[in-house]
């Protein structure tokens, strides 16, 4: 069927939060901003994250088999998001100027603007066109502070943020 | 690692919308409430929905290879959600008293409280513990009206809704 049946504005009504998905490859730590994160089962507790195939964090998760999710607070500054979202860990050390601790899995847990952190061990992964869906069994999670989670709607409508080209929702830039 | 490292309240900080995921099996139409829905790629546009293995909608999608997503508005009455969320299509016809149209794919599109509807053809599916993740290529989408999408946070905190036992996030009932 033709793609012109698709009104991209309809997709923009789907709700998301905004997260840092982090992992490691040997000693190298990396992380990125992602919106495509959710819990998928309750027993055992498992989560998914969907990342672009070309991203360094994808390479790290495939190598180490672990990843972490940091749930960003609504007040997260754009500069903090920009460090993780619009730069590549192949060019810079994203954790060079970022407060973090190492989790049980060895994945980095950025703490500065996180309401909660979750760690998962990779159960499996599968390709979907340009992206990879990672399925992780949760092995550790902590609430760091009270607050309102940053939503993707707030990021776009209030913070006037953009979606980078490798985001699942990058077409949103066109339709806003 | 032990499950007692997991604070379930951390998982509750993940953001979701609330959707009807619908499909068909022959002439039988069915649908259910789901929160585990998101867009995963932009080119082509694809979405995922994660449903419990035992649910009738899961059986329908596996049979017909198509599904639809209706994005619920914030004002959706609890009785409307209850019809789709807390009853089983094996016992009742969920579309008996529900305004809908048939989409391009033949999947039903409930319209009464939907901001937008999206139709997808199944690309693949994969099991994750108790659930099945469906990957669909979007073939049609329409905005039906302006409004604020119903979020899972609003459903729980303002509408005081519960999660049914087969929801990925069913443990949220315990920690609220």
Image (spheres, coloured by chain):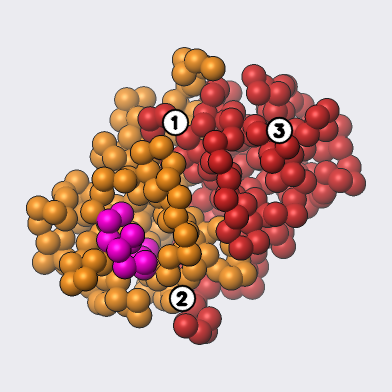
Chain colours: A orange, B red
Q: Quadrant of the N terminus of chain A?
A: top right
Cα separation between marks 1 and 3? 20 Å
Residue projecting furthest to the right: B91
User: For the point 49% across and 78% down, which residue is it?
Assistant: B6
Tell me if residue A101 comes above or below residue A78 in the rendering: below
Subunit under mark 1: B
Q: Are marks 2 and 1 in contact (CB under 8 Å)?
A: no
Residue that appears at 65% across and 23% down: B105
**Mark 2 on the same chain as mark 3:** no
Residue A32, relative to residue A153: is it above or below?
A: below
Q: Tag 1: Cα neighbours inside 10 Å, few (<14), some, or many (≥20)?
A: many
Which disc is residue A139 wearing?
2
Q: Which residue is mark 1?
A: B45
Local crowd size for mark 3, using a 10 Å CA cut-off: few (<14), some (14–19), many (≥20):
some
User: Disc 3 marks which residue?
Assistant: B64
Instruction: Identify which residue, A171 or B162, lies in the foreground.
Output: A171
When asked about the image quadrant of residue B111, the answer is top right
Lower position in the chain sequence, tag 1 or tag 3: 1
Q: Chain of mark 2?
A: A
Let me know if residue A66 is in the magenta part. Answer: yes
Residue segment shown in magenta: A58-70
The percent coordinates of residue A111 (x first, y second) are: 27, 70
Callout 2 touching callout 3 (CB < 8 Å): no
Residue B20 percent location from the top left of the image = 66, 40
**What is the number of the mark on residue B13?**
none
């Amino acid at each position: 069927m033709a793609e012109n049946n698709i009104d991209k504005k309809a997709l923009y009504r789907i709700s998301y939060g905004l997260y840092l998905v982090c992992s490691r490859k040997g000693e190298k730590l990396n992380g990125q901003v992602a919106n495509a994160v959710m819990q998928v089962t309750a027993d055992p507790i498992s989560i998914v994250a969907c990342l672009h195939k070309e991203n360094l964090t994808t390479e790290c998760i495939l190598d180490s088999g672990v990843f972490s999710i940091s749930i960003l607070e609504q007040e997260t500054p754009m500069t903090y998001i920009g460090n993780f979202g619009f730069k590549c860990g192949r060019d810079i050390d994203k954790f060079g100027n970022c407060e973090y601790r190492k989790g049980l899995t060895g994945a980095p847990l950025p703490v500065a603007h996180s309401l909660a952190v979750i760690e998962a061990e990779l159960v499996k992964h599968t390709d979907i066109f340009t992206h990879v869906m990672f399925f992780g069994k949760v092995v550790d999670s902590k609430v760091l502070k009270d607050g309102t989670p940053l939503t993707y709607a707030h990021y776009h409508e209030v913070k006037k943020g953009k979606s980078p080209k490798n985001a699942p929702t990058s077409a949103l830039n066109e339709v806003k």
